[in-house]
Image (cartoon, rainbow, N blue to C red):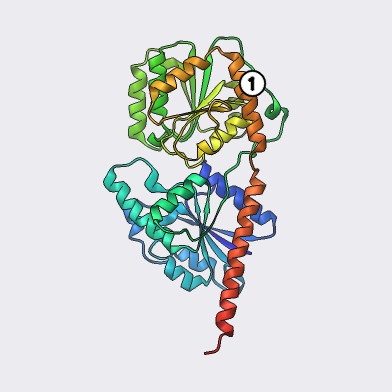
Amino acid sequence: MHIGLLIYGDINTLSGGYLYDRKLVDYLRSQGDSVEIISLPEKSYPGSLLSTEIPEAIRISNEGENNKFDILVQDELVHPSCFGINKKLKSLLGCPIVSLVHLLKCSVPAPLFKKTLIAYFEKKYLQSVDGLVLNSQSTKAAAEKLLGEKLPAHIVAVPCADHFPENDAQDAKQTYDGSGIFRILFVGNISRQKGLHVLIDAMAKLDDAKVSLTVVGEENIDPGYMAELRNKLNSYRYHKQVIFKGRQSGEALQALYLEHDVFIMPSVNEAYGIAFLEALQFGLPVIATSQGGSKEFVRHGENGYLIEPDDSKQLAELISSLKGNDQQLQLLSDKAIASFKQHPRWQDSCNKIRDFLQMMVEKNHNSMKNFRDSPL
């Protein structure tokens, strides 16, 4: 297959969605497919909505008989740039369009008017494509609710976490350093959606010098929110127990997973949560919220816990119950590793997507053949 992939910005951006895209591209190419990555510059949301012309990059990539796409895949992030041009794109390219849906933007916390506006355009976008690849049952349910009708052809292909080098650490049980410090890890780009403020509020309620927090993630996503967090920390007398590490990846991130006791990210709506899976891989119990895709693999009381969003009181109580309870932490750690081993691998999910893309291509070819062969 000759596949076009339409994204915003750099595919090497550190986020779960872009990791998913990279893993898919690598797999498709390993199977002999040609994948052309078409990167659009990201504008403001209103600016993108006003872009009604087919980007020149798409025209150039599809020029010449040998460069014709069999299928165009769009990361759903590009919906404001594509909702109004997909009809023209189909006419130009003559191929189906499939959207990779990681997280619907209208489900991200925002003022009601903004959410309503985004939902309108996101619905128009989903109606403009021929197929959907959804990253969780939760995302599928959100798409069904948004459309209020039967989804187009679709599959659910979950993210995975087997992208760290294989080593004995992935079979190791959690160990505790005897310092008495309860070590919490948070991994995620720092935005209100990820709920870091809830975790800091929980720590303030505990007011315990023996509880530490390491925060890994991009700090420049939302400067206003970051300033709010700094103000919270300034009023917390154990603020030195909260350490910001910035972005980390590879062996450095792997080491952090192994050095901590529990992973906590109280996201208000996590589409799935690759970081949760990474934590389970290294035997870290996970505390997530009951909203979003994490509830599909975090089992309350077995490999972690699910709390209500914004409930810092419940979170503080959970941290207090786990701190120093090495026996319970060990049981949770064992279950975490076992649940990760049962989870699909990237090859499984990417192969499922490739089969779906091939089906869409064959369906389009047969439709075009029947049209050509039909009598006038």
Q: Nearer the viewer, residue 88 or 356?
A: 356
Name the residue rendered at 66%, 37% in the picture: 342
Q: Nearer the viewer, residue 1 or 111?
A: 111
Percent x, y for residue 36? 57, 60
Percent x, y for residue 371? 55, 81
- In the image, taking residue 63 as reference, residue 204 lies left or right, namely left
Is residue 220 visible in the rendered image? The answer is: no
Residue 24, above or below 236: below
Name the residue rendered at 56%, 44% in the picture: 19
Identity of the amino acid at label 1? Answer: Gln
Q: For mark 1, give the secondary structure.
A: loop
Name the residue rendered at 54%, 27% in the picture: 304
> Which residue is outermost to the bottom?
376
> Which residue is outermost to the right?
168
Total numbered badges shown on the rendered structure: 1
> Which residue is outermost to the left?
113
Name the residue rendered at 57%, 26% in the picture: 285
Residue 282, above or below 271: above
Q: Nearer the viewer, residue 194 or 255?
A: 194
Q: Say which quadrant the N terminus sits in.
A: bottom right
Q: Which residue is mark 1?
A: 174
Residue 185, above or below 321: below
Percent x, y for residue 35? 60, 59
- In the image, taking residue 275 as reference, residue 80 lies left or right, namely left
